[in-house]
Image (cartoon, helix red, strand yellow):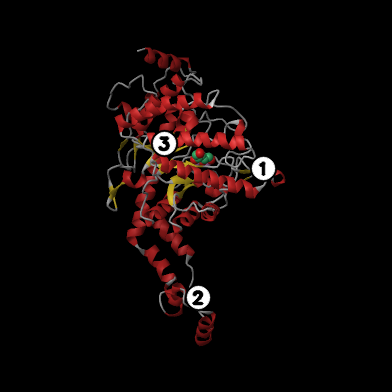
Amino acid sequence: MAKFNRIYTQFADLPNKGKNYCNHFPYINKNPKPIDIMAHFPCEKIQYEGPSSKNPFAFKHYNPEEMVAGKSMKEHLRFAAPYWHVMRNVLADPFGGGTAQMPWDDGSDSVENALARVDVFFEFLDKMGIEYYCWHDRDIAPELNDLSASNAALDQVVAKLKQKQSETGVKLLWGTACLFAHPRYSQGAATSPDANIYAYAGAQVKKALESTKELDGLGYTFWGGREGYSTLLNTNMKRELDHLAAFLHMAVAHADKIGFDGPFYIEPKPREPSTHQYDSDSAACLNFLREYGLMDRFTLNIETNHATLAGHTMEHELTVAANAGKLGSIDANRGDTLIGWDTDQFPTDLYLTTQVMLVVLNTGGFTTGGLNFDAKRRRESHEPIDLIHAHVGGMDTFARGLKIAQAIREDGRLANFVQERYSSFDSNVGATVESGSCTFEELEAHAMAHGEPSLASGRQEMLENLINEFI
Ligand code: XLS
Ligand code: NI
Ligand code: NI
């Protein structure tokens, strides 16, 4: 009851005074059921109502149990929510502070406050029907004055998360350590020029890994927020990369020691905050992993907005990863064509989600990975209920992308066109090229015998029209 009062008072203290947001949406009140005033997200659990529904609090396309190509939608999509954006993002931008209303949060660094957030987060997951989540150590628990105090705080929150997971069946898709926010990491963590900072980062990852293991996390992610440089004038790139590789080898060794057998993900991003980040795109990450003997245990977590910052499309980044058998997981968001930074918007573009799901389905689907909405609301969307709208949109857009991609696969014309386009490599000289037995002499003999080749059209426009048939 004390808690009820506290939250209610805080709602009442907001400019819009304890307002029942659901009154704006008559759809919800058709079946009048008292809205629990304790609810932090004042809406019912989101249900599938089908494409003709006008209810903003319903899925129009995401029908979790609906079968698509022999698997339920929820098994295909494996949606995850990021603790950092849902619970901790105050919606600041480079020109102004946070706007997000978080009436459940007392703004303190106390463990009590961190524990209270866990309940709110699980209410959110339940309302959305999202069964996976991801965190950084410092999202879920505060960084306190020294490492052992921070570790103790983390243990307390992890214990609560563990209890909530077992009550609800929610799973941890991956954990990670925040090695970029604290000033000590301003010049890098595993690529810091200072071995003391490097050691601190290692201690933090050790604990984050143990916490991931404690929560039966399916994977562990490295996003090298500050692993790069601002200027080469002060940077020994070779030593930094060697140190980063040694760090990742230590992570693998520690995982083996504690019995964590999930994959490690590297999440590529080219810049922001650094001028250049070493894990800049899929190809650079794969090269790094190969060079340093890390291919066995590592796979990639590809994020849409990072792909576009790297000057690639998302489908390019996914395809590069998939070709190497390294498409592990996805951070599902999008950028803004007019803004040149990581805007982390919710995916609402059907062309994008269709192309993402085409690659995912073509590679046989996720195993340990999933679709983590590494996305935040716009600064203008400051009410808690906007979190619900944002995720409803992202989930519906991916559900449609899944259905469209599967329809394109069943139709078969796209795949047939591509297969036909390369069919000259299926026999004769082409087949000897693919088998690795061909020589320049044979190519010359072939060219002499066949005269000027006639090249078929690539038919890009025809194929674009084909995709539009399905969208
Ligand atoms: C930031 C990254 C980050 C990672 C996790 O741009 O996307 O959120 O996903 O550290
Ligand atoms: Ni991300
Ligand atoms: Ni990002």
Q: In this view, does 457 lie above or below 232?
A: below
Q: Residue 317: image x %, image y %? A: 50, 53
Point out the residue furthest to the front here: 257
Checking the image for residue 212, the label placed there is 3
Q: Which numbered disc flags the more N-terminal residue, 2 or 3?
A: 3
Report whether residue 54 is seen.
no
Q: Which numbered disc flags the more N-terminal residue, 1 or 3?
A: 3
User: Dot 2, how many residues are within 10 Å of its Cα: few (below 14), some (14-19), or many (20+)?
Assistant: few
Q: In which quarter of the image is residue 231?
A: top right
**Which residue is disc 2 drawn over?**
455
338 vs 317, left or right, is right
**Residue shown at 42% from the left, 33% from the top:** 211
User: Dot 3, how many residues are within 10 Å of its Cα: few (below 14), some (14-19), or many (20+)?
Assistant: many
Helix, strand, or loop for circle 3? Answer: helix
Q: Residue 194: image x %, image y %? A: 64, 37
205 vs 31, left or right, is right
Q: Residue 234: image x %, image y %? A: 71, 43
Q: Are marks 1 and 3 in contact (CB under 8 Å)?
A: no
Q: Nearer the viewer, mark 1 or mark 3?
A: 3
Q: Which of marks 2 and 3 is in front?
A: 3
Report whether residue 226 is seen.
yes
Residue in the foreground of this view, choosing between 135 and 129:
135
Disc 3 marks a residue whose amino acid type is: Thr
Helix, strand, or loop for circle 2? Answer: loop
Checking the image for residue 230, the label placed there is 1
